[in-house]
């Protein structure tokens, strides 16, 4: 049986990576095979494109070209990591996926939504997430959290954008959660880490009953 495909989405500094890792650990503890991964990246080819995108060297090409590059990275990631994992029955937990392109390049970057939808159709096809958590934090607070996390290191391509951009991102993610309420679960990520993790686990239990999933001792991924 195909594994479950769960994604985490939201703006900068919303805690996606922490909660993706926490969920993966809880699933593994039940004996479920889990592939924990992230975008952009998650496969050899996609990691190369990640560097091009996050260093900012592709920024002069414009948001449409960036959307195409994110889609190219996703294509490699799907073909060499996500689809093979799902096929062998592992659950894939992914920190960001196609919704990030819809919101960062589409809503905030003003790329025509038909272009974004076409890329998604070509690249993602039927491999859509079964469940998506949208972690929501007010833009100002999220930017502050991202800056604290970074410490003295420099901000990347998207962290460098102004508050207005981050507010657009937040609105975009809230709109997405409302428009795809079946797939998306909106989480108030200003709550404590334990509380957020508990909300996430409850949603996974309700939908997929992981305690009764077939045991697959094949844990790969970071
Ligand atoms: P990353 O360092 O992984 O940060 P985060 O913890 O915020 O996920 O950087 C990924 C950056 O790339 C982030 O700023 C969001 C952006 N991004 C897009 O703009 N479009 C996309 O399709 C994806 C996957 C990410």
Image: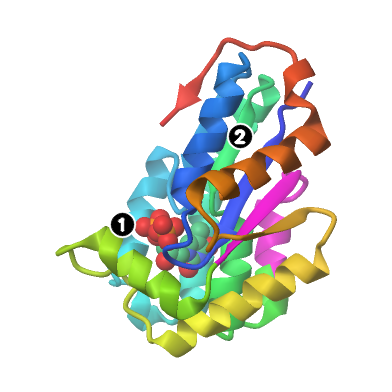
Label 1 residue SS: helix
Quadrant (top left, top right, bottom left, bottom right) of the C terminus: top left
Left or right of 84? Residue 47 is left
At horizontal 72% and vertical 75% (from top left) the residue drawn is 175
Residue where numbered disc 2 is placed: 92
Q: Is residue 143 left or right of residue 211?
A: left
User: Residue at image x 46%, y 55%?
Assistant: 15
Image quadrant where one finds the N terminus: top right
Q: Position of residue 59 (x, y in %)?
A: 35, 78
Q: Dividing the image into four equal quarters, which quarter contains ligand 1?
A: bottom left
Image coordinates of residue 48 in percent, x first then y, are 34, 50
Bounds of the magenta segment = 117-136
Q: Which residue is mark 1?
A: 51
Could you tell me residue 85's position as x and y percent?
Answer: 60, 27
Q: Residue 34: name its quadrant.
A: top right
Which residue shows up at 53% across the image and 63% down it?
A: 190
């Amino acid at each position: 049986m195909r594994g479950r495909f769960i994604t985490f989405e939201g703006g900068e500094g919303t805690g996606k990576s922490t909660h993706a890792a926490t969920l993966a650990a809880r699933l593994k503890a039940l004996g479920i095979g889990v592939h924990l991964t992230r975008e952009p990246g998650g496969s050899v080819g996609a990691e190369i494109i990640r560097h091009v995108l996050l260093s900012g060297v592709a920024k002069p090409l414009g948001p449409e070209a960036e959307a195409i590059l994110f889609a190219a990275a996703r294509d490699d990631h799907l073909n060499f990591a996500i689809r093979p994992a799902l096929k062998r029955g592992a659950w894939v937990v992914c920190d960001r996926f196609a919704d990030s392109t819809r919101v960062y390049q589409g809503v905030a970057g003003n790329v025509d939504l038909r272009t974004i939808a076409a890329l998604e159709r070509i690249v993602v096809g039927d491999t859509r997430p079964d469940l998506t958590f949208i972690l929501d934090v007010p833009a100002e607070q999220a930017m502050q959290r991202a800056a604290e996390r970074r410490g003295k290191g420099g901000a990347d391509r998207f962290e460098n954008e102004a508050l207005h951009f981050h507010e657009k991102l937040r609105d975009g993610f809230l709109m997405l959660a409302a428009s795809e309420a079946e797939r998306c679960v909106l989480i108030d990520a200003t709550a404590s880490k334990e509380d957020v993790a508990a909300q996430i686990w409850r949603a996974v239990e309700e939908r997929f009953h992981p305690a009764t999933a077939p045991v697959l001792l094949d844990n790969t991924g970071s």
